Amino acid sequence: MTNDKPKIIAGLVIFVLIATSPVWLNRGKTKEAPTPVMAAEATAKGYCVMPKAEMKAKHMKVLDGWRNSVVRNGQRVYVNESGKQFTMSLSNTCLECHTNKAEFCDKCHVYASVNPYCWDCHVDPKEK
Amino acid sequence: MNVQYMSALIAVVVLGFLAYIGTEFLGLNSLFGIFIPYLAVCFFLVGAILKVMKWAKSPVPFRIPTTCGQQKSLDWIEQNKIDNPSTTPGVIARMFFEVLLFRSLFRNTKAGIKEGKITYEWEIFLWVGALAFHYSFLTVLVRHMRFFLEPVPGLIGIVETLDGFFQVGTPGVLLSGVVLLGAVLFLLSRRLLIPQVRYISLMADYFPLFLIIGIAGTGIYMRYFARVDVVAIKQLAMSLVTLHPAIPQNVTVSGILYVHLFLVSVLFAYFPLSKLMHMGGVFLSPTRNLANNSRMERHINPWNPDLKFHTYEAYENDFREKMIEAGLPVEKEA
């Protein structure tokens, strides 16, 4: 008969270390949630294509819709609920006011590790 | 209709509603967001350890490996070193294939009657479904670490990028979530549609399946349809793992998240009490983790009582003269 106690205890230690890894990997840290900074240009303009709360929840849907509309239908004009017209363009329309991608978009996107493939093709004119 | 699956389904639906009503209408956010998750994780860790310790105490005096190939024999007979290992490296290889690829499930057969004869057919789909289920669940779990680590390690980003390889829409469709839900629905439909399997299925078999369907379903709903505020959710998750629990203020954590979190908590708490403990049990299967060396080594039961035996040698000593007299053969002449 062999004594398997050391092996089983080693296995349990590995299990507990893996299961509790988020706790000890984050030990001593209290990261505040990010607050995106609105650029002066955006504040000055005072309006976006949709109200703030809706933009927060739906901006990815808006951009996805814009992309399909421009790429597939060649339709580049977006009319919002209050009748305002916008050119469907991430780099030109969105970033025209939101001039600070790093402080605005990336703040939350990096925190939540949401890495959309927008920037595979589009550029932030400032980052060049 | 069958009481086994209906009761499991009702239990999961009631649990989901409990969390939704509790947080959306009764303001029990701290209970469902902090207290229950902590309790569930403690229950999971302590329960799993106690269960494994209990198993570890069970004696395994003899080698009882199930063998699926030629055992070590004469030199000119080829041994199947993985399916019938006689050494520790062989056992490690067998365990590797068992734990990571479910090798014994791969050999699954299905009994049937064809032309009046009983037949055993190789049935691979349970293995395929199980593999898809376990690996997609692992991927989903690894991806979720983005909510519990800050900064998010690059590796988790890579997993997510690979998972969203097809770049469908925004938020990008992640394959693992779809495969997880698909695989668990397949495993459930097996239990529901095959009469023999339905006959042996109990509430304890259906409950985890419905629970995981609920978890995957709420997760998919939150990501693609409700598009909940992930920053608020990460705030809550980070507060839990940094041991400074707090329900985020000024932002709304969706009620669906609490349903998701509560079902996950139930899964964690239920884990050590249930068949889900095969996660630990697979490592302790005596039929898998013992080398088949009974012909090379003598394994003596350690708690054999120290009995005094009357051996043949002693017997012959007692009766040698009488045996010779009677003409019986003896091993040792007088």
Image (cartoon, coloured by chain):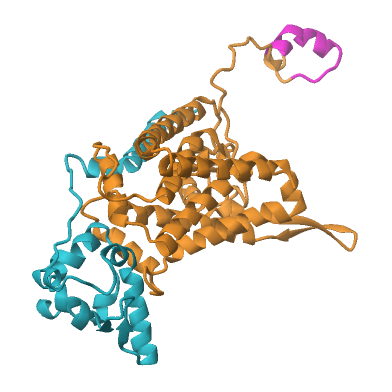
Chain colours: A cyan, B orange
Give left or right: position of A50 versus B317. Answer: left
Q: Position of residue B8 (x, y in %)?
A: 62, 42
Q: Residue at x 25, y 36 (%)?
A: B243
Residue furthest to the front: A82
Residue closer to the observer: B218 or B73: B218
Q: Is residue B39 above or below residue A123?
A: above
Does the magenta run of residues contain B325? yes
With respect to residue B168, does B126 lie above or below? above
Residue B121 location (% of width, % of height) = 74, 60
Examine the rendered structure and indicate whether residue A127 appears above or below residue B70. below
Which residue occupies the foreground of this view, B220 or B275? B220
Which quadrant is the C terminus of chain B positioned in? top right
Let me know if residue B66 appears in the view.
Answer: no
Residue drawn at point x = 57 percent, y = 39 percent:
B275
Lateral position of residue A123 relative to residue B93, left or right: left
> Relative to residue A69, is residue A5 depicted above or below?
above
Magenta range? B314-330
Residue at 42% across / 68% down in the picture? Answer: B173
Q: Position of residue B300 (x, y in %)?
A: 56, 25
Q: Quadrant of residue A24?
A: top left
Residue at the extreme bottom: A74
